[in-house]
Amino acid sequence: MPGRAIATKARPEQGANHIPEPRREARPGAEARNRAGLHLIAASVRRSRRAVVSLSVWSLLSAAPTLVSGKVLAEAVDHGFLAHNPAAAARWLGVFAAVTLAGAWAQRQTYPSLSGIVEPMRDSLLRSVVTGTLHRAARSNAPRTNSAAIAVSQITRQVEAVRDSASGQLMIAWQFVLTAVAVMLGAAALAPAAVPLIALPLVAAVCLFVTLLPMMIRRQRTAFLAEEQLARVSVDALESLRDLISCGAEQQGVDRGLRAARAQAAAARSLAWVAALRRLIVALGAHVPIVLVLLASPTLVRHGMTAGGIVGVLTYLVGVLEPALRLLVQGLGGSFLRLNVAAERLAEAARLPAAPPAPEHSILLKRRPVEVRHVTFAYGPGAEPVLRDLSLVVAPGEHLAVVGPSGIGKSTLAGILAGVIAPDDGSVLIGGVPLPRIAPDVLHQARVLLPQEAYVFAGELRENLRYLAEDCSDQTLLKAADRLGLTALLTRLGGLDAPVDPARLSAGERQLIALTRAYVSPADVVILDEATSHLDASAEARAEAAFHSRPGTVITIAHRISSALRADRILLLDGTRAHLGTHADLVETSPMYANLVALF
């Protein structure tokens, strides 16, 4: 019967040398991305107030060595070493050792409190992303049994990375705040006049760091994405090297690689300026106060400050403040970027898919065309599509045969036509209605799919044959059995009431039962996926003739070229493009089909 021609794969405006650029997905704005990690930590802190209070208490106790270090060292210098009293110096140093041990014990107690903040965050994130991932996998209906498990495994590792990064960010920020306060208090106890010399540069450095932090993260993100893009372009070029050479597009491939390399180099140079800014901030907040205190030392001594006090203040600056500020500036850089990137991707994974349109329950699908619109499908994100931009229309009542080499995608197409496999792109419609919009009970009555391995269950033969048509009469079953060639088996088993043991039936006998079941079903569209492969040639011809005379559309995934000869039209899949036409057309236009016919 006549039907619409298959659509070509190539877009008319694209030449043979066209190299598609990677598809860019819509992403949140830069400001939202930069704050993703902060929002994540803030939400976790709000949910764990008791753990936050406990963490604050133990952190304050762990800051005791920082608070007393300068004072103890000043006393040891003034009343011990300078007074030629080693015993006094030893006592002060012993006090410092005891306080340090107590602080270490308190520091150890902060980790259970920290876990009380980040572990609930981890559990909440994991629950959300696994739910979102499994919802999308369930809604896709694709036969990728391992893809959801792999995605969940990968996301679980990202959740663990977020937990580690978030806990590190909390500890770095909180420890810096406590350190800065302890340094200010300790310096005030030793030399109040030195406090402005420390506080003003430190406040300026922190303000500068907070102001420049978004810019630093943006540049780090740009460098991170530039490296990813360069790696992606390099891999694409290597995988497509033969195609690039065959279509004369080597220069385009080189230009694309150079653009990616230049972008990565520019991002790396920009990131080098970020490193210089970090050093400048540390110098402003920690090194400048050291210089100011040293320059002001004569004045401070004249106003009553001792040599031990000078040493104590410098101890606060060199041994405490400078490492804390350096850790803050460097730790909230790359680590914060990793936290934001992981948080952004987890937020996308946790997003539940949009609910599909409400299914249609009152659709008349009899004598309607089956349409395939730009269908593409691949078994995995990086796999070569087995179907690419396939479009065709099967007219009502038409008999279409699908042929091609083994593994070319014929059975995949059968699953997509039946709605048991969701295409990566494109859609399948019956009567103008997409398959996902058709309610399951209506779809089950509209089409039937017979795979190569026939399904037969233990029970009466009648129950097996009426599985898809419960109201079918015995007379109709017997007529169908005669048309399909099932009468001999029916007689041997003992009639419609006879029990069926699938294990005692041959593969061909099981296929005959399944074919008869599909024949008496109300389905207007029958999809035979090598459903006659275990029958001999004459039995296969008889079964196909029965379905050809049956009202409705038949789509046959053929394993013998003889099935194609009996079809109205033939769809040939050859791995690069699809050919649609009559037997005579394809013999003239397709060398592959002509070879298949010659071998037959």
Image (spheres, rainbow, N blue to C red):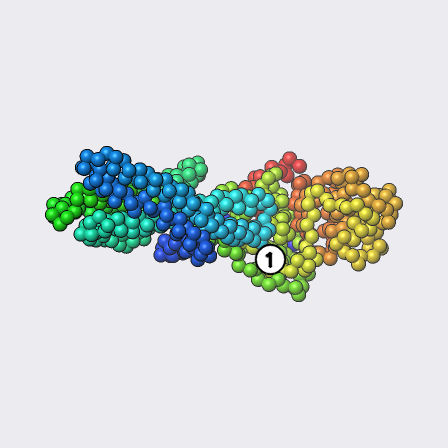
Q: In what quadrant of the picture does the N terminus appear?
A: bottom right
In percent of the image, x 51 and y 50: which residue is there? 123
Query: Is residue 508 toward the left or the right of residue 100 in the image?
Result: right
Q: Look at the image and tell me whether residue 66 can be seen.
A: yes
Quadrant assignment, res 529: top right
Query: Is residue 432 toward the left or the right of residue 288 in the image?
Result: right
Residue 491 placement (x, y as % from top left)? 87, 44
Residue 18 versus residue 426: which sits nearer the camera? 426
Q: Look at the image and tell me whether residue 118 can be seen.
A: no
Residue 508 versus residue 110: which sits nearer the camera? 110
Count of all numbered marks drawn on residues in the image: 1
Residue 480 position (above or below residue 596): below
In percent of the image, x 62 and y 53: which residue is there? 419
SS at mark 1 in the image: helix
Residue 540 placement (x, y as % from top left)? 74, 43
Residue 215 placement (x, y as % from top left)? 30, 52
Q: In what quadrant of the picture does the C terminus appear?
A: top right
Query: Is residue 124 toward the left or the right of residue 225 in the image?
Result: right
Report which residue position mark 1 lands on. 436
Q: Amino acid at mark 1?
A: Pro
Mark 1 nearby-residue class (10 Å; few <14, some 14–19, many ≥20): many
Residue 505 versus residue 270: which sits nearer the camera? 270
Residue 459 versus residue 276: which sits nearer the camera? 276
Residue 20 placement (x, y as % from top left)? 42, 47
Query: Is residue 218 toward the left or the right of residue 391 in the image?
Result: left
In percent of the image, x 86 and y 43: which residue is there? 493
In percent of the image, x 53 and y 59: which residue is there? 354
